[in-house]
Image: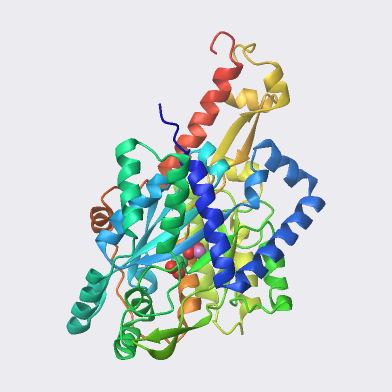
Amino acid sequence: MTQFAHPDDIRSRFSAAMSAMYRTEVPAYGTLMQIVSDVNDGVLAANAQLRSDLEQTDQLSRISEERHGAIRLGTPQELATMRRLFAVMGMQPVGYYDLTEASVPVHSTAFRPVGEDALRRNPFRVFTSLLRLDLISDAALRDTAAKVLAERQIYTPRCLELIDLAESQGGLTEAQADEFVAEALETFRWHPEANVSADLYQRLHDAHRLVADVVSFKGPHINHLTPRTLDIDRVQELMPEHGIDPKAVIEGPPRRAFPILLRQTSFKALSEAVSFDGKDGSHTARFGEIEARGQALTPVGRALYDALLTKTREKVRPAADGSNTDAYMAALQETFTAFPDTLEGIREDSLGYFEWSLTDKGRANAGQIAGLDAEQLLAQGYVRIDPIVYEDFLPVSAAGIFQSNLGDDDAQEFAASPNQQRFETDLGAKVLNEFDHYQQIEDASRAACVAALTKGAA
Ligand code: OOG
Ligand code: NI
């Protein structure tokens, strides 16, 4: 019997390799990692309750490991192969995001580990977008772009062989896994030589900056890597002191006692030297981002979140130059007073998902309880509930991140046109519905607690 490397382990190696590569490509990322790590240490030292909660739920070790990245692909074939590549490291497509809503001509999914054990081992995920050339109005340009994309091969030949091998063998040996990580990394590398002439680059750029970013290069360079921080407001504040210029506002919900969903901020894209058929030029695409993750919301909670965010933006639209940041943040805070900020309140209104686990008292009484249901077991301290962490993304936030590094001068508008079916056909699989998934985690954890405690049920 051959011993295969565990997909979680391959993902950890890949995530570390990607982080090391990005650090050399984008030095400000290294600086940001250092700020985040210092702030996280400070928060944990000052907040014993948070440290203990993270320890209890076995999440402490993943915090410093935690990051996501993002790429933008050009063709359905590239997307379908990317799905197979990520599957080798235990990452599945979760969720469908339509970015045309925000005038960005892509639709996306997040490849990520599913299931608690895999997330604990390493939660690395990649927000993956597919360009929608069909939305480009200039037909000649569209055809030219399609031709350029059809001719490129973003995967190394050995990477493709190893994906085939992983599928046919049912895994990769340790040595093959190491080779796979090195080969897969090549796809995400920055290439300073463009695939197109300076003239074509300009035409693509005029259609939409994002089109130029996808079509002009040999591969889908990783465009950011995002560490998770325990205090995003503090990191936002510290960035300028370290020579990093953050975007004006933190996307997502306001600061809360019980964080929900996702808060994100980024720093502006770098201008990088590019050679277009030997002619010197530049391109801005790659940037840095940080995020803070809170509780996953139910469809009811999410609807309330969306409504309150819309209401806030009707009052104050955050300006990219930061001129009304304080007014926006104040309006956000004010509007969100309508969203309960206690665990009881969130649970009472069925706004968020919770994970159930045994307390010390519960473990001491395993298999000995009769006649109590889950709520009674909770009330009597045999079990505890903790918010389930939101592992996904937010379209409005993603749009804000896209926009902040596309510049504020992009004129072309697109009508919203979600097309999940088309996306799934191109992907070659259905995306997992994130709400169903969180619901399953909650239900399974509650059932497991009841079973572990109940007399004669174990
Ligand atoms: C992806 C932007 C979305 C996030 O964290 O919401 C994203 C991109 O710019 O390609 O990464
Ligand atoms: Ni991101």
Front-lying residue, 173 or 409: 173
Q: Position of residue 22 (x, y in %)?
A: 54, 66
Q: Is 208 positioned to the left or the right of 123 in the image?
A: left
Instruction: Give coordinates of residue 223: x percent, y percent.
Output: 47, 69
> Where does residue 458 sit, x and y in percent of width and height?
55, 13
Instruction: In the displayed orientation, state which residue is furthest to the top.
Output: 456
- Name the side, left or right, on which 391 lies relative to 259: left
For the N terminus, the image quarter is top left
Residue 341 shows in this picture: yes
Of residues 375 and 439, the one nearer the viewer is 439
- What sort of colour scheme is used for the picture? rainbow
Q: Nearer the viewer, residue 445 or 194?
A: 194
Judge whether residue 90 can be spotted in this image.
Answer: no
The residue lying at 41 percent from left, 30 percent from top is 2
Give percent across and percent down for residue 241.
Answer: 74, 77
How many discs mark residues in the rendered view? 0
Q: At x 42% / y 51%, what residue is drawn?
A: 180
Q: Which residue is outermost to the right? A: 46
Left or right of 119? Residue 283 is left
Q: Is residue 211 above or below residue 426?
A: below
Quarter assignment of residue 372: top right
